[in-house]
Image (cartoon, rainbow, N blue to C red):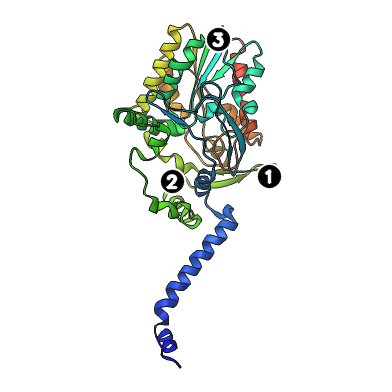
Amino acid sequence: MGKGQHFLLRYAAFWLAPLALVIALLMAEGVLRLFPQLLPEEAQIKRLWQLQTPSSSIGDPYLGSVYPPHHKTEVKSLDFRFAVESDEHGFRNPPPWPEQADIVVVGDSLAYGWGVEREAAWFSLLDERLPESRIITLGMPGTVPQQYFRYLTRFGIGLKPKLVIFAIFPGNDVAEAETFDRWLAAGSPGNFSEWRFFEGRVPDRRVRFPNNSYLALFLQGLKKNLSQKYASKTITLADGERLQLAPAIYMKAFERNDPLDPGFQSIVAATVAAGDLAKEHGSEFLVLLFPTKEGVYLPLHGEPFPTLTQPLQEVLEDEGITCLSLIQEFRTQAVAGKKLYFEIDGHPNELGNRVIADVLAEYLKNKLP
């Protein structure tokens, strides 16, 4: 036996164990990449975000961010594929803009119709259901209520709308509203949609591999499921369709969904300011509250899950603001076995958008001036 072989055998325990561990980790990574459905639900949501084709916005010191005019691209995701095509002001309307619009919608990705084509988005469907009205949406993904007010001020109120729809999603608005306040306090540096991810600190590129590793996502998701009050789960509907529910991603929203929270107060202040602006210009004002996918489906499967919309609705109604929550109609449709959201992503699918349009059309039937 040669000296080299003798050395390898003598110290085999020192190099075989690490080698076996590396091989095992690589095999686990490979299995999860071949069968990503083995990932915990929250990990699959993170993976969807990582793989989703970005759609670049541009910074604005007043608005925070907006899409470039006449911007065209395609967004691809594990759940959907749709076209992004902006009008002359960077929003998702068929050009040209009218001199006057009957309804102006402001909000984030839920007012944008994220995940579906423009023709299938709820504001387009509502436009069809109200043929005498022209609707303009100022929905912009990744934004917060303070920005909605600013979009309304710069672009919407000049259209002399009969109605302003202020779309709010408490699932992420409370925490991100405070982030926008910090962006303002920092002097409005650059594009808010980018700044909010790292608040002026350039991300360390060395963390890229762990973030992109399926095994790391699996372990992070498993740890959260074991430690959180609300565990993730996948439900199967009567027709065999699946929905992945990850309530843990809203834990911060639960903790901060309080009238004393600074982010909550910023939302209320922005909403009240928008309502006052609408009233000054002779427009009706309606707050449309969007529920989470988990808030719709988990209670129907024996797992209590608090609605995030109720505290905000109560405070706004005390301020004299009219609110319309979608939670009850969504739950009614869910009881009937309807799939209103994408399997992984938390945005409403085409059916969900149709339900939103139907609810609003019925509500507005005799309410528009």
Q: Disc number at residue 272?
A: none
Q: Disc number at residue 240?
A: 1
> How many dots with numbers?
3
Mark 2 or mark 1, which has the lower sequence index? 2
Quadrant in which residue 122 is drawn: top right
Q: Residues within 10 Å of mark 3 (few under 14, many from 20)?
A: few
Is 282 in front, or is 358? Answer: 282
Q: Nearer the viewer, mark 2 or mark 1?
A: 1
Is 138 in front, or is 312? Answer: 138
Q: Disc number at residue 229?
A: 2
Image x and y of residue 302, in percent:
55, 42
- Tag 3: amino acid: Glu
Say which residue label 3 marks. 99
Report the Cα–Cα distance between label 2 and label 1: 28 Å
- Tag 1: amino acid: Gly
Quadrant in which residue 97 is drawn: top right
The quadrant in which the C terminus is found is top right
Location of residue 25 with respect to 248 vertically, above or below:
below
Mark 3 or mark 1, which has the lower sequence index? 3
Location of residue 17 with respect to 281 vertically, above or below:
below
Location of residue 41 with respect to 26 vertically, above or below:
above
Is residue 262 rendered to the left or right of residue 111?
A: left
Image x and y of residue 355, in percent:
63, 26
